[in-house]
Image (tube, rainbow, N blue to C red):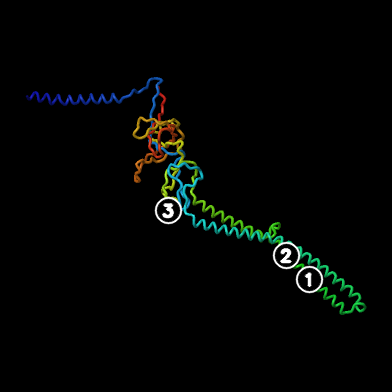
Amino acid sequence: MIRRSRFLMVALPLAAAGALTLATLSIVRSNTTPAVAPAGAARSTIVAGAGVVEPAGREIAVATPVAGVVRNVRVNPGDAVKQGDILFTLDDAIVAATLAQRQQDLRAAEIRLTQTKGRVDQLRAEMEAARGAVEAARAERDEAKDQVDTGAQLVGGAVSQRELTRRRNALRGAEGRLAEAGARFDGTRAALALIDPAQQGASWLADQQAVQQAQAAVDLARREQERLFIRAPSNGTILAVNIRAGEFAAAGGATAPVSMGMLTPLHVRVDIDEADLPRLALGRNAVGARRGLPAETIALRFVRAEPILTSKRSLVGGADERVDTRVLQLIYAVETPEIDLRPGQILDVRIDSPKPAQG
């Protein structure tokens, strides 16, 4: 009995050690690959990454340039829009009243300019009349002067001293009327020079400048009103509407009031970990599959690679998550349009990168 117990104490550990050795050899053989591939053969490695479906050119978050209360929303998710179509409008009661006031100011300035232009013909006629009055007064003055000169020669004979005095007084009156007519002519000419467009008169320039300023104020009010009509920046499809009539739209809010994008073709943005970049062959097409359908084949055509690596973004949405992995983003176009894909959908993407065989 004692001899049997000693035999078991020796045999059982030896058997266990032998079984462990055989298991280890089996595992090593199953995981060992030939060190050298056959001559002429090629190997391939698959680089995989998660891709997110997005519109061509990425999603456009349409914002409002000014804050205000939404008056009406003219689009719904799924609507096709063209560049310049109105998406939603903000309340414009104050801006509309300001525009009406600016238009009245413009009308008043235009009327003043029209009045100024109308006075040009009037002043020209008055200046011609004043010129005629000057000529008449000058002729009267010359006649009176001739009477005085003649009387001075005949004084004491045919002309008495009193008559000569009367003629001299008449000359003074004629000279006064000539001076008055000349002053009236000069005043009319100066007034005409202020409003005559041909002479770039100061009053005419001031009235014209007032019209231009009023027009600029009207244009500014119209632009302010136009800013309250939020339009589509490009052709595309409405993806989401996050605003309703009566709500307050904040400028620069975290959530865009309207999101849109081009759905033809769809793009897939694939994140490739920086550790996989040495095995990646840029420019090759890829194959994608929707989650839950690993055997699915969605043809993806290479479009471009982003020039810079970015921090890896978590797909679980945790706001406090921190990652230190950087990724290269590749953009692919979906070449299988018959498969129903939606922006924001996640695909498993595989990129086959062949490697030349080593000798």
In the current view of this chain or complex, which residue is farthest to the left?
1
Displayed quadrant of residue 59: top left
Query: Which numbered disc, 3 or 2, marks the residue that appears first in the sequence?
Result: 2
Name the N-terminal-most of marks 3 and 1. 1
Q: Which mark is residue 348?
A: none
How much space separates mark 3 and mark 1, taking CA atoms? 78 Å
Q: Position of residue 213 (x, y in %)?
A: 59, 57
* Displayed quadrant of residue 313: top left
Task: Determine the secondary structure under disc 1.
Answer: helix
Q: Amino acid at mark 2?
A: Thr
Q: Disc 3 vs disc 2: which is toward the camera?
A: 3
Q: Residue at x 60, y 58 (%)?
A: 107
Out of 287 and 227, give the one closest to the viewer: 227
| Residue that carries the numbered disc 2 in the rendered image | 188
Q: Is residue 279 visible?
A: no
Quarter of the image with the C terminus in it: top left
Q: Total marks drawn?
A: 3
Q: Quadrant of the N terminus?
A: top left
**Could you say where residue 200 lies in the image, as x and y percent from the top left?**
69, 58
Q: Is residue 200 above or below residue 7?
A: below
For label 1, count other residues whose C-alpha is less than 10 Å away and answer few (under 14), some (14-19) or many (20+).
some
Mark 2 neighbour class, 10 Å CA radius: few under 14, some 14 to 19, many 20 or more: many
Q: Which residue is mark 1?
A: 177
Check disc 3 and report its element: helix, strand or loop.
Answer: loop
Residue, disc 3: 246
Residue most toward the right? 157
**Left or right: 235 with respect to 169?**
left
Tell me where residue 134 appears, x and y as whole percent.
Answer: 79, 66
